[in-house]
Image (spheres, rainbow, N blue to C red):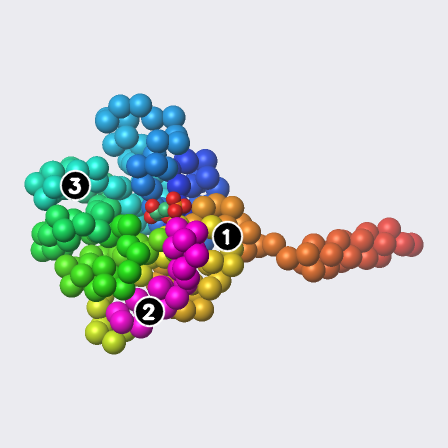
Amino acid sequence: MKFFIDTANLSQIQEANDLGILDGVTTNPSLMAKEDISGEQAILDHYVKICSIVDGPVSAEVIATDFEGIIKEGEALAKLHKNIVVKVPMIKDGIKAIKYFSTKGIKTNCTLVFSAGQAILAAKAGATYLSPFIGRIDDMNWDGIELIEQIVDIYDIYGYQTEVLAASIRNPLHIVKCAEVGAHVITAPLSAITGLLKHPLTDIGLAQFLADHKKAAESK
Ligand code: E4P
């Protein structure tokens, strides 16, 4: 399972990359707005900065919602760096644009996915990645992980090449559950990724080992 970090924050991206387990980055307009960026050119420059930190796919989302606008914006984003993946919303013109991009060899991430039906359409259009939002589904009292499992099963049956990129992850357990049901990729905040490190028995065991070593090293 690949690990993407879900942020536009350069120091968090650097920290995750330094762990040596990072495969890529996802951003969205809300995550970009949280950073100290002002102006359209600064937004584009920020994507390039992210690409200079991580050697892997970096999702950059289009703002346009009409076919021509999505194509124009997506082509400009794709030209920024070879690792840019154009993130396109799951709407009618978005599906048309994903089909267009797939014929042009431009990688796409179909975002704002909340159902298996949407997932089938995106795969048929040739999306590179599909982003079902599991946390937002859980927030509605439905089961986000069940949706990931359902989509992975459908994609397996038909041999679709689209990778299921579980998004809107809130905690480390979401990541483990995504691994259990076969998500190809997870994108998560740094806190959820580093949360996987934590176990009280590891802390207790390490403290004991260090104390025992100290005793042995200091004894004559
Ligand atoms: C990433 O691709 C998504 O935009 C992101 O995971 C959404 O997360 P949220 O539901 O926490 O905003």
Count how many numbered circles sit on residues in the image.
3
Give me the residue at 41% from left, 62% from top.
143
Q: Amino acid at mark 1?
A: Asn
In which image quadrant can residue 123 be found?
A: bottom left
Q: Which mark is residue 91?
A: none
Secondary element at image label 1: loop
Q: Residue 37's x, y, as percent?
A: 34, 26
Residue span colored magenta: 136-155
* Percent position of residue 100, x then y: 9, 52
CA gap between label 3 and label 2 equals: 28 Å
First of labels 3, 2 by sequence position: 3
Local packing at callout 1 (Cα closer than 10 Å; few below 14, some 14-19, many 20+) is: some
Instruction: Quadrant for residue 82, please give it.
Output: top left
Instruction: Evaluate whether residue 58 shows in this view.
Output: yes
**Residue flagged by tag 3: what amino acid is it?**
Thr
Is most of the magenta stretch helix, strand or loop? helix
What's the amino acid at mark 2?
Gln
Say which residue appears at 11% left-offset and 52% top-offset.
Answer: 96
Asked if labels 3 and 1 touch by Cβ distance under 8 angstroms, the answer is no
Residue 150: image tag: 2
Number of the front mark, 1 or 2 = 2
Q: Who is closer to the viewer here, 163 or 94?
A: 94
Q: Is residue 146 magenta?
A: yes
Kindly tell me whether mark 2's CB lies below 8 Å from ligand 1: no
Left or right of 158 on screen, residue 21: right
